[in-house]
Structures are given as structure tokens and as C-alpha cells.
Image (cartoon, helix red, strand yellow):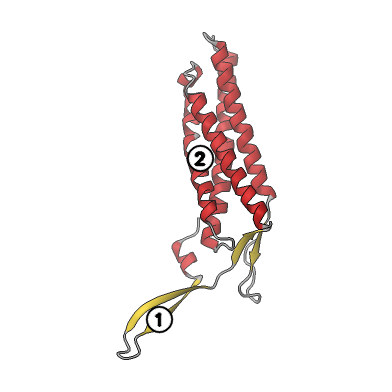
Amino acid sequence: MKSKKHYAEQYEVVQQLDGAKGRRVKYDYIYKGDYFRYDVPDRKLLQIRIQYLALSVVCAALFVLAGLLDTDGTRRLWVALPYVGMFFPIAMMVYTCIKQFFASRDMTEKEHDAVVGDLKKATLGLVAVSALTVIGTAGFLLTEDIREPAREWAFLGMTAALFAAALSHWLIQRSIPVITIKQHPDKEDTKG
């Protein structure tokens, strides 16, 4: 996570002076950093944003539906803890996907980090936590006596589908190139 100082250094402050009295009236902030852009046409970008939002909503729906099943497995810590932990990445994914619709075509570094970076982190977090939920549920199915196997298998299927949706969401994000538009071509690229 980058500091506020890092982002503030990318702006130049210009003072607007009152001509008659010579007092400071206001400050103008001019962005001097690099811009970032998805390297796809505008129509394709809209399709990508809709696809991101749809996958996030599918993940949220699977999460809620799996929670409504009320299975014995969800009463075990190794299943319940990762399952409940899925709420935070899902909420962040949906929020960030909605933010994408309001992001400008050429994003500042702060916008890029808040939209593209946060979505990748939330999706990767959901992949990890949903995998732990699937593993915990499978462990429960293999080691415990089950009263209602249909519910347990339905829960496992929904969490596995959620894992698959999150993984495909993450892979799609990685496949779409983001290019850097340099404001100052002579400036060295410090990113590895």
C-alpha cells in the first residue's frame, strides 16, 4: 500500500493570486504522474466491466445461497471460519467493480491502485478463502458422520462453484493488459 505522500508527490500545486490585493485565492493541483489505461477499445472495456460485475454478483449470490443451507459442516470451525471470511473479499469485489464504472479511461496512479489493484487483491483473497472452505468441507465430508448428505454436498458444490468463479475472475483480470502512459518520457521507470 502506498502512502498519501507518494500520491501527493505526483501533483504540482499552483497558486492563483488575486491581482488587486496580491493575496492567495485558491490552489490548483495539476497531476504530473503517469496515467494507466486498459489496452482495449472502449466497447470492449464496457464489456469487461459488465463481466467483472456479473462475476462478482454471481460470487455474492453463491455465498448467500450456500449460507442459507444450514449444514452441520458450517458448525465446524475449519469450515465456518473461511466461509465467513469470504464476505470481506466479496464485498470489496462488488464495491470495486461498481467503482470501475466511474473510473476515467486514463487513470491516475491512485485511481489505478484503487480500482485495478484492489480488485485483483480482493479476487485473489476470495480464491484463497474459498479454496480453504472447499478443503474444510471436503475434510468434514470424509471424516464425520453426516445426517443430511444432500445439503452437505450442495454446500460443497456451491463453494466449489464460487471458487471456480473467483478463479476465472482473477485469471480474466490478469489477461487484460494495463498500459502506462508516461507524462515525462525522460523519467526513469522505477517499477520492476
Question: Mark 1 is on which residue type?
Answer: Gln
Image coordinates of residue 186 in percent, x first then y, are 65, 77
Few, some or many residues within 10 Å of mark 2 (<14, 14–19, 20+): many
Kindly report which numbered mark, 1 or 2, lies closer to the viewer in this rendering.
1
At a point 62% along the width and 66% down the height, the residue shown is 190
User: Image check: 136 left or right of 179?
Assistant: left
The residue where tag 2 is placed is 89
Question: Mark 2 is on which residue type?
Answer: Pro
Between 32 and 22, the one lying in front of the other is 22
At a point 58% along the width and 22% down the height, the residue shown is 156
Residue 115 vertical position relative to residue 35 in the rendered view, above or below: above
Image coordinates of residue 182 in percent, x first then y, are 63, 70
User: Image check: 160 left or right of 27?
Assistant: right
Identify the secondary structure beneath mark 2. helix
The residue where tag 1 is placed is 15
Residue 20 vertical position relative to residue 55 in the rendered view, above or below: below
Image coordinates of residue 119 in percent, x first then y, are 55, 47
Q: Residue furthest bottom?
A: 20
Sequence-wise, the earlier of marks 1 and 2 is: 1
